[in-house]
Image: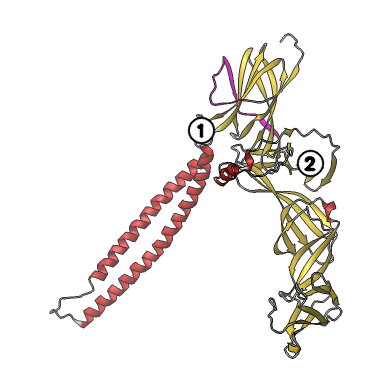
Amino acid sequence: MKNRTPKTIVLSFFLLIISGKTFTQNSLRVSNSEIQKIRIYQSGAFVSRSVKVNLNAGINEIVFDKLSPYINANSISVKGFGDASIVGVNFQQNYLKIQKTSSEITKLEGEKDSLTIKLRYIQNKIMACNEGLAVLQANRSIGGANNGIDAVKLTALVEYQIKKINSLKDEIIDLGIKDQGLQNQITKINQQLSVLNSKQNQSEGNIIVTVNSSSKSLASFEFSYLINSNVRWIPVYDIRVKNTSSPMEFILKAKVYQSTGEDWTDVKLSLNTSNPTDRVQKPNLTPWYLNFQQEADLYYNMRGSRSDDESAAPMMYKLEEVKVKMDTMRWSNAQIIENQLNNEYEIENKYTLKSGNVETQIEINRINANAYYEYASAPKLNSDAFLIGNIINWESLNLLNAEGSVYFDGAFVGITYIQNTSSKDTMNLSLGKDERIIIKRTKLNEVNGSNLFGNMKEKKFSYDIIIKNTKKETVEITIEEQLPISQDKNIMVNALELSGGKLNPISGLVTWKISLKAGESSTKKFNFSVKFPKDTSVNGL
């Protein structure tokens, strides 16, 4: 180049995937590029690398190899720093490179051969024992029909035969256990070999950069690319509550999986909640026309020869770029960057992620949320008292849509699912049942029954609901019952006694909010009647 001032040349353009290449005079294969950072999306990953290369004078074809075969060629960007010009960038998948068998595969194959030999010895012994057993069982007749035998000798022979048969059967059992154990070990090795060989036989990606250099020089390159598939992360929560006087702790973790063909060793990671493979353009609605259907069109549609999708494709436009001021908060293991479209978690510690789709868990942050706790029960369905944790203004926690494992007092309670699209002001999480609160719902037969009043029939229902607190502290509990809802004016439902319960006339839900001191109990009466014409029957009673 005429201008000898060091320059930076950036290429980011649509690339062509080619199936083969021809090396120029100066062909350089570079395998030692270093990963600077990886941004993992919920589907896909963006990888940034750098490397220094000694260039020769003239045209240099640099092959950055040992990359993922799942690279999106259109996403590749290359920067060059030095007195040279980048004249071309291509991407190819290399299916022809002979890969050396890894030491792990060699070791496993050796272990498999050794176990296979031991298995054959065991199987040969089992066959010999079975043959010996067959001989003994086939020769149970001792002596001929006309030949007498001494009683003492007969007893000794019978005892010997029984002892030998039992010994052979015991040995067959022992050998069978060893046989099964060896087969299990071989099966596990075969499974591991299958994983390793699939990786061993995988093609590799090559980014080929053509550079024109005026002289021998050392040039620095930075290149990046998007891997479309075979890498993802899934958010999950551990939700932990120590006791009913402590806050609720949300521990956000990422389950990361990758089988990209690249091993990422001790790399800087960030986790992004977006998906780069999603469409970023909004479709426009086209006019929706109605008209009378002609007979020919009716026949045409009945034949199934045309679908609604055959209308003109909607026009598309590109979403305008929006510049957003980033707000940064630092929590625990990650720096959280929020913008208008997604969240990104900058992980502070470096991680190693080997290709092979093995799960790696990464803790992102921990959030303590103030909560109030209460017990609730619907004894008509289940007589257990369930502890509920309630969080007001939960939207400020910036929780993700994710599965959560709930723990109370160190014990696993169950699985819940957090939905950040809920319109409720309060988030309710069930923390399991407490057997120290006893609830009993009893139907009172002496009150239940039927009465006739002219053309009307009345059925009465009465229940006692007893709640007892055997805990050492005061508890607050909500008891739920329900009145049936009439859908016909001739069916009349009347609440006779609710013991102070609050009735929702629309849903029929009856609730009692009860405070019970340690050892205290309470009884609520729930009585109602249903009237209807005597010559009819009512569904649901």
Drawn side of residue 272 relative to residue 23, left or right: right
Q: In which quarter of the image is residue 352?
A: top right
Residue that badge 1 annotates? 99
Residue 128 at x, y = what percent?
30, 60
Residue 245 relative to residue 444: left or right: right
In the image, what residue occupies the spot 81% across and 53% down?
367
Residue 15 visible, this orientation: yes
Q: Which mark is residue 341?
A: 2
Q: How many labels does the image show?
A: 2
Residue farthest toward the top in the current orientation of the protein? 2
Packing grade of label 2 (10 A; few <14, some 14-19, many >=20) is few
Q: In this picture, which residue range is highlighted in magenta?
A: 16-36
| Whole-number angstrom distance, CA of label 2 to CA of label 1 | 42 Å
- Furthest toward the bottom, the residue is 446
Query: Callout 1, which amino acid?
Result: Gln
Above or below residue 391? Residue 230 is: above
Q: Can residue 468 be seen in this view?
A: no
Seen in the picture, residue 26 relative to 375 is either above or below; the reply is above
Position in image of residue 272 (x %, y %): 74, 42
Disc number lying in front (2 or 1)? 2
Q: What element carries label 1?
A: loop
The residue type indicated by label 2 comes to Leu
Say which element carries label 2. loop
